Amino acid sequence: MSSLLWIAVSGLWRHRKLPRGASRAECARWLHQTCLRGICAIGVELSVEGNPPAHGLIVSNHVSYLDIAVYSAAVPCVFVSKAEVEEWPVIGRYARWAGTVFVRRHDRSDAARANVSVGDSLHNGVPVVLFPEGTTTDGQRVLRFHSTMLQPAIDAAAPITPCAIRYELSDGDAAHEVCWWGDMTLAPHLWNLLGKKLIHAKVVFGERVIPRDPEFHKSLGMRPDATVGALSDRKDLSRLLHDRVVRLYARLIDGS
């Protein structure tokens, strides 16, 4: 616990050394280095399968607040997160300084603003991690994806990498002691998590999808010259990505 606190404090100090007006890429690298140290301090053993993308959108299932630290340790990136996270002690400050795009759920007008910020990150070459389920789960299944935040990637013709994350515990039940979902209270859940000897975190990156690529059009049964960006196309893309994430998650389970 003391080592984690030291890493958190030193991480905040290192952020102060970043240049004024640091880019999202610089902030992503800062968070990446801090999270690499942080997950080691709490006994997280990370294994990565596939090639982490250097840019574009990363789409994943979502099971825990720990997902943020694990993905950031796997690849320098920024995140799309619910607005409530910005108010969390320490975590909220880290998220804000790391260039997280906060979204007020159930507010359509705010989604438009967030899409602009996501688009800026994509154009600046910073990978953006999106959890399109919109909430965390117990890891038993992957919920339906919401398609709204996919629009910036479609507009930018940015590559989208489907991926999946899963946890295993040698001394407990990951579905209740690592996954954080439902009406679980954060503080006692986190305290219990920090007492675990070893947490296995597994991430698999799949093959990327490029929305304006003719092969993508063909996969949806569309004409090669069809315009991508209409609402129905975005929903089709959402279903395609959901299917790929489900398959990747099944691979993680089968490889346990």
Image: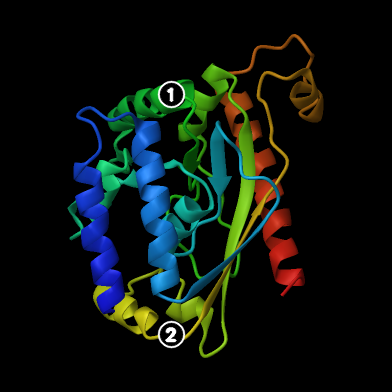
For the point 46% across and 76% down, the residue is: 43
Image position of 233 with respect to 104: above or below: above
For the point 32% across and 75% down, the residue is: 190
Count residues near mark 1 (Cα–Cα under 10 Å), then give few for <14, some for 14-19, many for 20+.
Answer: many
The quadrant of the rendering that contains the N terminus is: bottom left
Find disc 1 in the rendering and name its residue: 119
Colour convention of the picture: rainbow
Count residues near mark 2 (Cα–Cα under 10 Å), then give few for <14, some for 14-19, many for 20+.
Answer: some
Q: Nearer the viewer, residue 61 or 127?
A: 127
Could one spot residue 168 in this view of the protein? yes
**Mark 2 near mark 1, Cβ–Cβ under 8 Å?**
no
Could one spot residue 86 in this view of the protein? no
Please state which amino acid type lies under the numbered disc 2: Lys
Please state which amino acid type lies under the numbered disc 1: Gly
Total tally of numbered discs in the picture: 2
Q: Secondary structure at mark 2?
A: loop
- Rendered location of residue 66, percent (x, y): 42, 64
- Rendered location of residue 249, percent (x, y): 67, 60
Label disc, if present, on residue 217 of the rendered structure:
none
Q: Residue furthest top?
A: 225
Q: Secondary structure at mark 1?
A: helix
N-terminal of the pair, mark 2 or mark 1, is: 1
Q: Given this view, does label 2 or label 1 mark the residue nearer the observer?
A: 2
CA gap, disc 2 and disc 1:
38 Å
Find disc 2 in the rendering and name its residue: 196
Image position of 98 with respect to 217: above or below: below
Image position of 70 with respect to 212: above or below: below
